[in-house]
Amino acid sequence: MNITIKNIRLKSQQLSEQTFDTPKEVVSWMGAMQAQDFTMAKWAIAIRSKQCAEQDIEDAFNRGDFLRTHIMRPTWHFVSAEDIRWLLKLTGERIKGAWKYVKDLKVDEHELTKCYNLLERTLRDNNHQTKDEITKIFEQEGLGATERHIYLFTMLAEADGIICSGVLKEKKQTYALLDERAPQSKDIHKDEALAKLAQRYMQSHSPASLQDFVWWSGLTIKDCRHAFSLIDNELIKDHFGSTELYIHKDYNECASSNTNVLHFLPAYDEYLISYKDRTNVLDLEHHPKAFNNYGIFQSIILYNGHGVGNWKKVKKAKGIDFDISFWDSKLKISKELLTLEGKKFQDYIKK
């Protein structure tokens, strides 16, 4: 039964058949994509698009086609510029409530307002600034400028829709005003936002459980259960062995995927991280090789949708090579498949 789960997930996640041309379309389809590792998150977009080089993705990011901000759980995510406002309204309070520094640093509303005003003055007219540049400005203004304070101020400003990602500055991340990076959009009711988020998740992550959606979204169980009920006519509940999962109706007659398909999956990829239960695509004994209890995820090799090893790029004088290790010494994978996937990554970097 796990074969069926993997086949559907490869398709829903755009890994077995890529249907989108642009990074913006990929990010929008996925709803949101975890992106604390910016380099790996770019590759996550590339493997889900028809043909996107790294520079294409950076260009789209710099244009503001998609943005990087704390949007769920809370951690960094890519999100479409068209989706960021309704999604922030849905998740913003949960993000602020989950941030461990909030109570510890005891920032009052007056101090927070001063910080927001300073950020707005500093970043207006597309004057995008790095975290280090913002820290210096906070120091000059006599506001708390410890690393922990800056993390808190910027995260809260993201959750409140004041700032988001700006253009890359010498490969460094910057902050910008959300009003200057994302179009104003019509305010939507909470139920509409819940339904939209659940629909995006199930279209791009099927099959999945309610608990998977709770984990991915960071919303309450009550809200997630209600979200699923709002799109009940689009969901099919089915048993895969002893596991009960929901499938979006688009995959009710999903054909079997091609065999001998290999992917170099980036660290923190949605194929793994967006599910509470990962045993359907990754043997329990190999979990520590893919992620640890501190939330650190490694780059892994997928073979026919199943985790089988680790990979990492190695810079050499003549270009990029790869360090490959398989978890089962008896597993036989052709060198041609490995060479083909390696070339995809090399072409992605070079183009």
Image: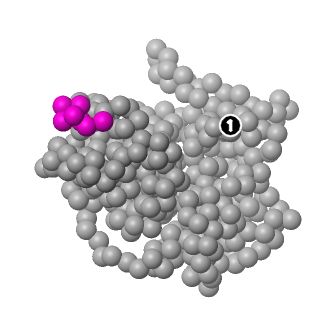
Q: Residue 138: within the magenta? A: yes
Q: Is residue 308 left or right of residue 103?
A: right
Residue found at x 75% / y 31%: 326
Residue segment shown in magenta: 137-144
Whether residue 63 appears in this view of the structure is no
Residue found at x 72% / y 34%: 289
Q: Is residue 201 left or right of residue 182?
A: right
Whether residue 107 appears in this view of the structure is yes
Please provide percent x and percent y for residue 252.
69, 75
Q: Is residue 41 left or right of residue 180?
A: right
Please provide percent x and percent y for residue 187.
33, 76
Q: Residue 190: within the magenta? A: no
Q: Note whether 125 is above or below 232 in the view shown.
A: above
Residue found at x 50% / y 24%: 320
Q: Which residue is mark 1?
A: 292
Instruction: Indicate the secondary structure of the residue bearing disc 1.
Output: loop
The residue lying toward the viewer, choosing from 280 and 18, is 280
Q: Looking at the rendering, which quadrant does residue 295 occupy?
A: top right
Residue found at x 35% / y 38%: 150
Amino acid marked by disc 1 = Asn
